[in-house]
Image (cartoon, rainbow, N blue to C red):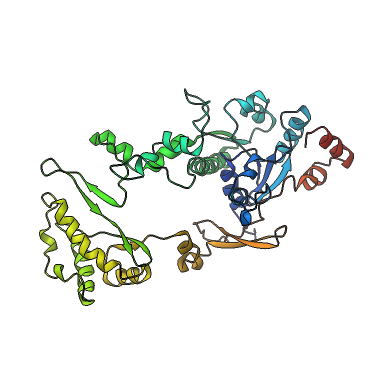
Amino acid sequence: MNQKPKAFLAGYRVLDLTDEKGQFCGKLLGDLGADVIKIEPPEGDAARNRGPFYKDMPDPEKSLHWFFTNLNKRSITLDIETADGRAIFEQLLQGADFVVESFAPGYMNQMGLGYEELERIKPSIILTSITPFGQKGPYAHFRTTDLVGVSMGGLVRLFGENDGPPVRFSAPQFYYLGSIHGAMGTMIAHYHRELTGEGQYVDVSCQQATVLANRISVETFDLLKINPRGAGPNTPVPRPTPPGPVSIPIVKKCRDGHVIAFIMGGSQAGFVKSSRALVEWANQEGMALELKDFEWEKMDGSTISQAEINTIHDIIDQFLLTRTKTELMTKAVEREILLIPVNTTRDLAESPQLSHRGFWKEIEHPELKDRLKYPTWPVQWTGMPPYQPQCRAPLVGEHNLEIYEEELGLSKDHLVMLKTQGVI
């Protein structure tokens, strides 16, 4: 009987030439079981210098960004701009199934390592290129930061206050979105290869990946000629003038943070039921009595004034301030109230649901004499064992001897010469 693999990509190898623009792609392929060899320049990848750092100690071997985006990889150092470096890369290519890179468009071709050359060496190879704007077009050679990228992708406009300037989402998004689509495109190309034996060139645009994160904003403009934008803690309700648009507050303060609560009525039975249940609970606690007999079914969204909306919400807000997020969510589930907590990162780290799913895994870092907790995959598959990380992120060139000497058969004297010449 054939033994089932321990992971989908077990037995496959990835050569990862990416910088911060594409490192998350290789990490995702490693999560699926691939043997990912991270190829760094001899001085180490510049992304190692990106914070935050373990215990706030700036050190290229203690970058938490590096730890996360290079989980499940092995590291070798190699300068592919040298003739010897390219020759070694071609040797590595013979045992590889995927190559992932994030150089500027045309760089791999200049090095003699473009897709046509790699395909000639190994016809079944899949080459994935992750760049800000794709390989061709008027912006192809523009350089970006995350802020530039998410702005060019339209995402910044969807955050902030409705009457204020657009606001950047605080955590990096641009390259992560591109990397996720890069991993997805790589797997689709892999499926094609399994069916036909043919390799593929996968060209990823981080801008296009970001546009897809804008929900239906582009479609809204196309159909209604309205440019959606950030609404802060409120939900804007467009109406003809008069009476003009109104704003419904949905982000509410509570005793230990914030919740989102939909306090509305009118013809939507779900809103009516939820709002009434919330007021009934508040009444039982001796609060919001002004709304005890409020007829939620008669709330007319087309005529109600902003002042009336504010009065209703101010009354309920006073009650919400007396309860914690946990108390509010417990009652929301029990009474079918449209209310959810706004989780903090600490809430997520301590979430009983995520813990039950095995979402957090501790990984040993012997060089730090510590174990660090990592997020894993949100997906579980039938017949596959629970996700287990292969290894922590590598140190600079940690696997040079393992790969160059043991796998490629290069002698110690040869390795010393390559190191002296700056090739490795």
| Residue 139 horizontal side relative to residue 78, left or right | left
Name the outermost residue toward the right.
413
Q: Is residue 388 visible?
A: yes
Q: Nearer the viewer, residue 377 or 396?
A: 396
| Residue 87 horizontal side relative to residue 254, left or right | right
Q: Is residue 198 visible?
A: no
Q: Which percent across, then down, holds residue 236?
A: 24, 47
Q: Quadrant of the N terminus?
A: bottom right
| Residue 199 horizontal side relative to residue 138, left or right | right
Q: Give above or below for 125 relative to 366.
A: above
Q: Which percent across, then down, holds residue 333?
A: 31, 69
Q: Quadrant of the C terminus?
A: top right
Q: Nearer the viewer, residue 189 or 223?
A: 223
Q: Which percent across, then down, holds residue 59?
A: 67, 48
Q: Give above or below for 369 relative to 56.
A: below
Q: Give above or below for 140 relative to 124.
A: above
